[in-house]
Image (tube, rainbow, N blue to C red):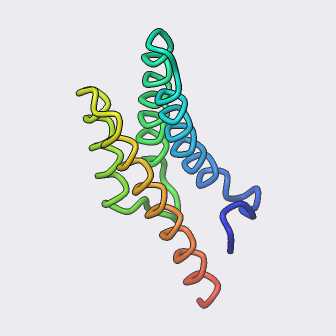
């Protein structure tokens, strides 16, 4: 199962993935932005990560792995400290771990 093929009933997973992708895209834009725009892009990344944290608490069959939550927390902390490169790395790690967990979750469900 590829994440781009999530069905409509997987909206919560789709929204979680969207927030991680949005945070990563905002940081990519921050790296390319002029100084005046950089803070706005960093704010967008922070808001996407905060939205992820709220959404991942929503009850459902899929539980966001602890390592993903930890990486998101670290990224938020690093953004607050102005460590954009470290935050970017943690967001990318979180995204990769999240995708792997979702794929494994649906593989187990198909087998059951």
Percent across and percent down for residue 18 are 60, 44
Judging depth in this view, the residue of 106 and 2 nearest the camera is: 2
Q: Residue at x 48, y 55 (%)?
A: 95
* Residue ranking furthest to the top: 36
Q: Is residue 22 left or right of residue 74?
A: right
Residue 61 screen position, x and y as percent: 52, 65
The vertical placement of 89 against 54, above or below, is below
Q: Residue at x 40, y 57 (%)?
A: 93
- Image quadrant containing the N terminus: bottom right
Q: Identify the residue at image location x=42%, y=59%.
A: 64
Position of the C terminus, as image quadrant, is: bottom right
- Judge from the rendering whether residue 34 lies leftward or rightward of residue 53; answer left or right: right
Q: Nearer the viewer, residue 12 or 86?
A: 86
The quarter of the displayed image where residue 19 is located? top right
Residue at (42, 16) in percent of width and height: 39
Coordinates of residue 53 in the picture (x, y in percent): 41, 41
Indicate the position of residue 90 as horizontal and vertical percent values: 35, 49
Is residue 72 or residue 36 the one in the foreground?
36
Q: How many marks?
A: 0
Q: Nearer the viewer, residue 64 or 90?
A: 90
85 is higher (above) or lower (below) than 30? below
Q: Compared to 85, does 14 lie above or below?
A: below
């Amino acid at each position: 199962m590829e994440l781009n093929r999530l069905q409509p009933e997987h909206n919560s997973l789709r929204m979680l993935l969207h927030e991680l992708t949005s945070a990563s895209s905002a940081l990519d834009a921050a790296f390319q932005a002029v100084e005046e725009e950089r803070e706005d892009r960093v704010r967008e990344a922070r808001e996407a990560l905060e939205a992820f944290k709220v959404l991942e608490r929503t009850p459902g069959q899929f539980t966001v792995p602890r390592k993903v939550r930890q990486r998101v927390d670290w990224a938020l902390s690093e953004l607050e400290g102005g460590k954009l490169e470290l935050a970017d790395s943690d967001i990318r790690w979180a995204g990769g771990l999240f995708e792997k967990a979702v794929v494994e979750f649906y593989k187990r469900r198909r087998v059951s």
